[in-house]
Structures are given as structure tokens and as C-alpha cells.
Amino acid sequence: MNYTLLSGIFLEGILSFFSPCVLPLIPLYMSYLAGDHKHSDEEGNITYDNKKVFLTTLFFVMGISLTFLLLAMSISAISVFLDRYREAISIIGGTLLILFGLHECDLIHIDLLNKELKPKIDLKLQEMNYLKAFLLGFVFSLGWSPCIGPMLANAILLAASDEGGYLYIIVYALGLVIPFLITGLFTNKVLSFIQKNRKIMNTVMKIAGIVLICFGLYMISDGIRKIDQAKTLSENPINEEEDKQDIGSYLYHYEFKDKDGNVLRLSDYEGNYIMINFTASWCTYCKMEIPDFQEFANENDVKCFFIMSPLNEEKGREDIDKFLEEYDPSLPVIIDEEGIMFYYCGINSYPTTYVIDPQGHFVCYANGAMSKEGFEGLLDYSKQLDE
């Protein structure tokens, strides 16, 4: 999971709040949500009971969140089907995002994206309660979907092209609902700001368009990179005469190079348990677990390696070199130039740690950052599998 992309998706959720089909209607929504907790003075100025409005707004955003939660669950449910088409989805989706971005920048016009659905459901909003606030959020979020389509589409397409990518949709939803919660907490001030700054929508939409174009270019380049990587691997198939067992045997005897350019084969450590930690220069959790992995290696009879690849969503080898210079890991670092280990092990989340037994079999793995005790537990589990 790329945390830089998640940050971008969160920003798009916030930008969606300022879209033409959401921001102008905020005063209307808040009027509904306030119910009888709003007061008008002699001059016609309306004030709100912020505590009461915040509570109804909280249920309102829960209704909005339900829409996106269902969408995330749908993406997760069909992830197995999508897996074989991820490269194509990435390229086609990236192209669509560029078109959406050009539309948001007002350089081209796509009529469908200027529309919104209007579900005809009478909730009798004059008498507001928490259940109605929840239903209001759910119904109106369905109506926004076509209008905020370009930015929502970005989250969906990224989710479809990345296993476990449903998190993109959840993060997008958070970016969208947090401004609503802030509005519910500071209703008078926020509505006053919106009233005075309606022209901000045009600027926000252009910013959103630029963000979409950047995402589109990233998805296209990532899809092409993965296709090239698969092509490279197909042109270097397993040598059946040398490696007659399986892919694990092929990787076990493969000639990698360490960070200094020295040849490194895992089979040179036959007879020992080996733990390989797949890491990335952009991964925050990878950086956090480096001390624990090194401490574990120093205290246990096991050969430990970090492994990195310039094809692993890195800008290139220079990113890896900067990372190694900054963190200076004491353990050997395998540089998987062709991404062959990442590809065959199916690495799609970071960090991931694989265990290889003394006979060269890849016996188990664990996703996510772990403590020293976690690595010890993983090693003990591997040994039990061998018994």
C-alpha cells in the first residue's frame, strides 16, 4: 500500500466537499440537520445550537460513510477477479482519470459529470432526529456520486488496481466527511465562510483536476512498468535442468546482488533458517520496524536480509540509495533489480517478511510491521511446521 497515494486520496475527499454539487447545498443540509435547534433574531440572522447540530451531523456522516463502506466491500469482494486484469485496469483507469482531470480544469466538457441524481424520498426533514439524519446522509451521498464522480472514480480505480485497495475508498470517505463534522461543530463560522467565498469552488475544481491528471499519469506508468516487469520475467524462465523443484528453488539459487554489487545467493546459507524482509524507501512502517528486525537478527540463530527493488514503486535506484544512506541498516540488503523476488512472492503490502527453512523451502510469511517478539514468534511457527 502506497501511503503517498493514500494522502492524495484523502486530499481529494476534502476537495470533493468543495465541489459544485456539495458546497452550495451545505447551508440547506445544515438547516435540515439543525431541525428546531436554530434560532433567528429580529434582523433575520440565524444561529445554531452547535452541540445539537454536531450530534445530528455525526449521524449524517455515518450515513454518507455507509455508502462508501458498501462500495469498498464490493471492490474487496471482486478483488480476486480483478487481480488478473490489474495492469489493464491501471492503464485504462489512468487514461480516464486524465480525461476527468481535463474536465475539472474546464479544458474539455463531459456532460455526464455535471449531473447529479436526486432520489425522491420524503424524509419529512422538518422534524429532524438521528435516524433521519443517518438516512439523509445515505440518500444524499447517492445523489452526489455522479457529480463528484471524477474524484470518487480515482479512489475506485486505484482500489481496483491494487490488492487491498479498498482502503483508498475508506480514506476518500474520511476526507469527505471530516469537513462535514467541522461544519457541524462550528456551524455559524463555517456557513459564514462559505457564504463569503463561493468563488472558491472554481479554484478547488482546477486543483482537483491537476491532482487527477497526476494520478492518471502515475497509474499509466505503473501499469506499463508492471507489464514490462512481467515481460522480463517471461523472457528469463526457470531453468528446469538446474531447478527441478519449484519457483522457491529457483529463487533460492538465483544470483542477486547486495547493495555494494556483490553476488548473493540464498543457497549459500543452506542449513540455516533465513528471513527476508521486503521493504520500500517510501514505506513508513518499514522504517519503523528496522531496529526491531536488526535486534532480532542479532539475538537469534537465523540469517536475515532486507530486500528492495527499484521496480517496487520507487522512482529508481537513487531512492533506494538515499534510503540506505539515511537508515544505514546493519543487515545485508538484497537489491532485486528485476523485481523477480517481489513478483514471484506476490508482494503487495509492505513490510512483508518471508521465512525460508534450512532446506530452502519458503515455509511462511507475515504482512505488516512487527516487533522483535513478533519476528521470534514467526520463526518459532516456522520451526513447528518443519517438525
Image (tube, grey):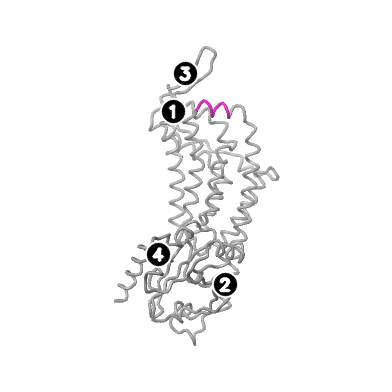
In the rendered image, residue 191 lying in the magenta stretch gets the answer yes
User: Cα distance, mark 4 to mark 2?
Assistant: 23 Å
Element type at mark 2: loop
Check disc 4 and report the residue beneath it. 366
For the point 67% across and 47% down, which residue is it?
102
Asked if marks 4 and 3 touch (Cβ < 8 Å), the reply is no
The quadrant where residue 377 appears: bottom left
For the point 58% across and 70% down, which residue is it?
229
Asked if marks 1 and 3 touch (Cβ < 8 Å), the reply is no
- In the rendered structure, which amino acid carries the disc numbered 2? Glu
Give, as a single range, the part of the protein colored magenta: 187-193
Element type at mark 4: strand
Instruction: Give residue 235's position: percent from left, percent from top.
Output: 58, 77
User: Cα distance, mark 4 to mark 3?
Assistant: 57 Å
User: Cα distance, mark 4 to mark 1?
Assistant: 45 Å
Disc nearer the start of the sequence (4/2): 2
Pick the quarter of the image with the C terminus. bottom left
Check disc 2 and report the residue beneath it. 338
Please tell me the numbered disc located at residue 53: 1
Q: Residues within 10 Å of mark 3 (few under 14, many from 20)?
A: few
Position of residue 362 in the picture relative to residue 41 (left or right) = left
Disc nearer the start of the sequence (4/1): 1
Closer to viewer: mark 2 or mark 3: 2
Check disc 3 and report the residue beneath it. 39
- In the rendered structure, which amino acid carries the disc numbered 1? Val
Q: Residues within 10 Å of mark 1 (few under 14, many from 20)?
A: many
